[in-house]
Image: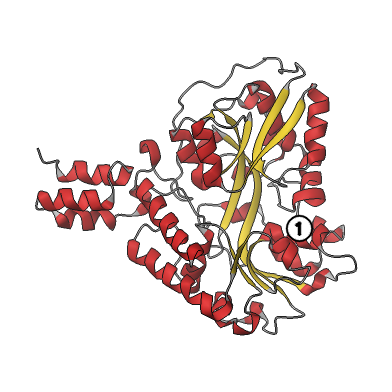
């Protein structure tokens, strides 16, 4: 029995059918044109994992609750056991973990992952112990759909309202902050050594074009090792600002442009620009703002002049802005402590120390401003542009959101071709 056109399109958008399967089904029904209409549909109308609408800054989504949050007034699980944090390596200060452990009488252990793909896979398979986890906003719906997280009780997290930017207290990807609290915010831009790179990238008509004109920096150029960010780079170069497109032709064009970089500058796929720029192992990098701040504050060799580090970010609305989050895992053995960790990391002093003393990624805390950073001589004035503000995360922000399942696969397969090339 043939499926109706509507059912086929819904199956495609929800990820239950591949594009090939949908095309075959529609052709069998004599309706191949319907697939084209579905493929051209506004991505804001697409359905993501688990039937959750794809959230966008101008179209916020309230995530479904698979269970009730824990009750208020419960005592912390201070039983001398182990509290497990799941996060990138070197992304949270061990001193803070130790301080939290001493406060609540537990040992705090970090289980590290290298990519968010790895994190989601391990959480889904149950092969990792984790009470809290880092999660990126563009994979949150997938984690919620997979019932990998539990909703949070704000009674345990007063610092969310007290200290966090108002624009991040009910973010578009998690209205009312039902599952997450924000951890860090950052832009994606260009970092370079001004004592080596002769071009003043700030003044170029199209600064992104520097990568396609970087022959003299061959072997010393870096592209972010991230399946979304890498493909976004050539899209921005071409003036394409739909960073959540699921159009195969647009993704294929981005891949072609990326592959063209190989003979031009032979870029390295990297997330270590915070080390390689100050130590001279790279000159020009596609980079996150947090890496530039880290490079300036504590990764530069002794005696290095941080004024040699430059960072360009596009104007508001054309600059990719992202943020990472903390969440409580569905399998948390210490859910009360997990909530208290979320509050602990949003404490003004803890957030400041984690930022300026360890990871370099700015937390969206009201008391932390670019003017304060410059005034306290933590960064040079030339890196002022690497700091974000509350207004950078409004409905007109340029952000990489959750994709549908077919869209996610489309981007990942394209990136795999580039990384293999």
Residue 223 shown left or right of residue 253 in the figure: right
Find numbered disc 1 in the image and state the secondary structure of the residue it sits on. Answer: helix
Q: Nearer the viewer, residue 223 or 149?
A: 223
Query: Which color scheme is applied?
Result: secondary structure
Residue that numbered label 1 is attached to: 294
Q: Residues within 10 Å of mark 1 (few under 14, many from 20)?
A: many
Percent of width and height locating residue 172: 50, 44
- Tell whether 2 sits left or right of 144: left
- Residue, x 29% and y 55% (percent of image)? 41
Residue 233 percent location from the top left of the image: 52, 67
Above or below, 6 relative to 329: below
Quarter of the picture containing the N terminus is: top left
Of residue 8 and residue 281, the one placed in the foreground of this image is 281
Residue pictured at 46% horizontal, 36% vertical = 62
- Looking at this rendering, what residue extends furthest in the front direction? 420
Image: 25 above or below 232: above
Left or right of 372: which side holds 155?
left
Is residue 238 something one can see in this rendering? no
Q: Nearer the viewer, residue 389 or 343?
A: 343
Instruction: Give coordinates of residue 115: x percent, y percent.
Output: 57, 48
Q: Is residue 351 visible?
A: yes
Which residue corresponds to the image point at 65% horizontal and 80% vertical from the top-left? 217
Residue 64: x percent and y percent? 44, 31
């Amino acid at each position: 029995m043939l499926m109706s056109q509507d059912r086929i399109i819904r199956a495609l958008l929800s990820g239950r059918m591949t594009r090939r399967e949908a095309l075959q089904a529609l052709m069998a029904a004599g309706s191949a044109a319907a697939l084209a209409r579905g493929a051209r549909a506004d991505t804001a109308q697409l359905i993501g994992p688990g039937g959750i609408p794809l959230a966008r800054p101008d179209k916020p989504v309230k995530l479904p609750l698979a269970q009730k949050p824990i009750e208020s007034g419960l005592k912390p699980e201070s039983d001398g056991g182990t509290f497990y944090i799941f996060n990138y390596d070197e992304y949270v200060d061990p001193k803070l973990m130790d301080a939290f452990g001493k406060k609540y009488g537990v040992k705090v252990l970090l289980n590290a992952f290298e990519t968010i793909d790895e994190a989601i896979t391990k959480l889904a398979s149950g092969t990792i112990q984790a009470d809290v986890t880092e999660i990126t906003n563009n994979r949150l719906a997938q984690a919620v759909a997979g019932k990998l997280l539990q909703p949070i009780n704000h009674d345990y997290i007063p610092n969310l309202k007290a200290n966090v930017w108002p624009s991040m207290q009910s973010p578009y990807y998690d209205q009312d902050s039902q599952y997450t609290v924000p951890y860090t915010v950052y832009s994606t831009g260009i970092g370079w050594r001004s004592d080596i790179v002769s071009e003043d990238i700030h003044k170029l008509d199209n600064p992104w074009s520097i990568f396609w004109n970087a022959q003299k920096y061959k072997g010393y150029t870096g592209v972010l090792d991230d399946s979304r960010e890498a493909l976004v780079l050539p899209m921005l170069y071409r003036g394409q600002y739909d960073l959540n497109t699921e159009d195969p032709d647009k993704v294929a064009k981005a891949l072609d442009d990326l592959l063209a970089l190989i003979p031009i500058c032979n870029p390295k796929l990297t997330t270590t620009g915070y080390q390689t720029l100050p130590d001279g192992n790279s000159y020009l990098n596609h980079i996150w703002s947090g890496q530039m701040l880290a490079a300036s504050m504590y990764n530069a060799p002794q005696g290095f002049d941080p004024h040699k580090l430059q960072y360009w970010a596009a104007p508001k609305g054309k600059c990719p802005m992202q943020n990472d989050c903390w969440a409580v895992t569905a399998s948390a053995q210490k859910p009360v402590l997990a909530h208290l960790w979320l509050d602990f990391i949003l404490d003004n002093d803890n957030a400041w120390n984690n930022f300026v003393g360890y990871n370099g990624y700015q937390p969206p805390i009201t008391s932390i401003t670019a003017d304060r950073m410059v005034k306290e001589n933590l960064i040079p004035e030339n890196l002022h542009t690497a700091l974000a503000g509350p207004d950078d995360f409004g409905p007109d922000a340029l952000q990489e959101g959750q994709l549908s399942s077919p869209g996610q696969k489309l981007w990942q397969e394209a990136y795999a071709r580039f990384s293999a090339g």
